Image: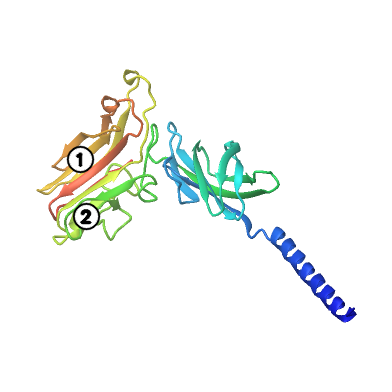
């Protein structure tokens, strides 16, 4: 017998067996990536997953802001998850042992409505389970909600000391090359006059005179934040819009005050002659029970005219 040959064959077999066993162990323990990607976002549309992780909203005394949180999980592992828990620090249990098959590289999202009363950072944790329950992965994310008090609301006076109030906006529908738009008297580059209303300090201002003849036709509106008339019966309370207004007319300009009832705009006042007065307009005839009342002050004309101001 050739012992040398037997020894070589045995050694070769042993090395081959050892290498095969090592390969088998490596194949069993190499599970690739082991992370899940969880994102919590916030928006105002329940039909889509928002893209932002923070939001600024305006609160009112009678209309609590309604938001929608989106919880999205992406499976960045080579495993499949079949049960899911989501716990939110504000809403509590959002999902508990929820059955959904989430394959590798797949994503899954849901939205939930929330009423937000105060500025806060709200966190959530998503926990995913494999079918056998042997692998459990969790991830946490948060959103920031900043709540600002409303600018216009019942029994509250609005001023313009800090500029156009948060929640209000200015439209510019002028067709000229540089049409006049609403600003404040603090903006001396675009408003050439001081506060000429019966108010004091800074007023909202639109000045077509400072723009000159090159400005062209203008049509600009100062629109309030949405607000609510808090009465269940329209005849039980008198609610009026009050404001201090200064308006100097020229020839082809017009100043109007309108209210949005939730469906359409209603004209409350139209001027095309000089005025300096405090107005008080009853809003109840325009209330149809809908949320989202808004007031706008509109100034329009065909070129260089004078100006309009609103305060208080």
Q: Which mark is residue 56?
A: none
- How far across and how far down the image is residue 309, in percent? 25, 46
Q: Please state which of residues 224 and 250 is positioned toward the viewer in this rendering.
A: 224
Q: Please state which of residues 187 and 235 is positioned toward the viewer in this rendering.
A: 235
Q: Please state which of residues 58 and 145 is positioned toward the viewer in this rendering.
A: 145
Look at the picture and state if 110 lies above or below 75: above
Can you name the residue that lies furthest to the left here? 251
Look at the picture and state if 286 lies above or below 196: above
Asked whether residue 70 is in view, the answer is no
Quadrant location, the N terminus:
bottom right
Look at the picture and state if 295 lies above or below 30: above
Say which residue label 2 marks.
180
- At a point 60% along the width and 49% down the height, the residue shown is 80
- How far across and how far down the image is residue 113, in percent? 49, 37
Look at the picture and state if 21 lies above or below 57: below
Secondary structure beneath disc 2? loop
Instruction: Answer with left or right where residue 202 lies relative to residue 7.
Output: left
Quadrant location, the C terminus:
top left
- At a point 35% along the width and 34% down the height, the residue shown is 292
Instruction: Answer with left or right where residue 216 lies relative to residue 17.
Output: left
Asked whether residue 192 is in view, the answer is yes
Judge the density around disc 2: few (<14), some (14-19), many (≥20) Cα neighbours within 10 Å: many
Say which residue label 1 marks.
256
């Amino acid at each position: 017998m050739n012992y040398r040959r037997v020894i070589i064959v045995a050694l070769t077999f042993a090395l081959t067996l050892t290498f095969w066993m090592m390969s088998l162990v490596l194949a069993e323990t190499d599970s690739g990536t082991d992370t899940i990607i969880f994102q919590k976002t916030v928006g105002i549309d329940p039909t889509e997953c928002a893209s932002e992780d923070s939001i600024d909203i305006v609160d009112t005394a009678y209309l609590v802001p309604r938001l929608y949180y989106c919880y999205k999980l992406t499976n960045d592992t080579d495993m499949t998850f079949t049960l899911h828990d989501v716990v939110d620090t504000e809403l509590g249990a959002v999902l508990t042992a929820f059955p959904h098959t989430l394959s590798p590289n797949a994503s899954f999202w849901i939205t939930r409505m929330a009423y937000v009363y105060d500025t806060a950072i709200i966190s959530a944790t998503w926990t995913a389970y494999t079918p056998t329950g042997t692998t459990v992965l969790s991830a946490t994310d948060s959103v920031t909600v900043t709540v600002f008090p409303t600018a216009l609301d019942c029994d509250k006076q609005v001023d313009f000391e800090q500029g156009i109030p948060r929640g209000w906006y200015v439209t510019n529908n002028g067709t000229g090359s540089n049409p006049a738009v609403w600003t404040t008297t603090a903006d001396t580059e675009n408003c050439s006059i001081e506060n000429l209303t019966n108010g004091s300090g800074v007023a909202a201002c639109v000045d077509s005179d400072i723009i000159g003849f090159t400005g062209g036709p203008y049509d600009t509106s100062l629109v309030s934040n949405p607000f609510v008339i808090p009465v269940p019966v329209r005849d039980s309370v008198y609610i009026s819009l009050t404001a201090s207004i200064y308006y100097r007319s020229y020839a082809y300009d017009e100043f109007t005050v309108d209210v949005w009832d939730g469906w359409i705009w209603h004209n409350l006042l139209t001027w095309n002659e000089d005025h300096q007065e405090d107005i008080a307009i009853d809003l109840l005839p325009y209330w149809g029970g809908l949320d989202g009342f808004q007031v706008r002050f509109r100034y329009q004309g065909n070129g260089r005219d004078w100006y309009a101001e609103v305060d208080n």
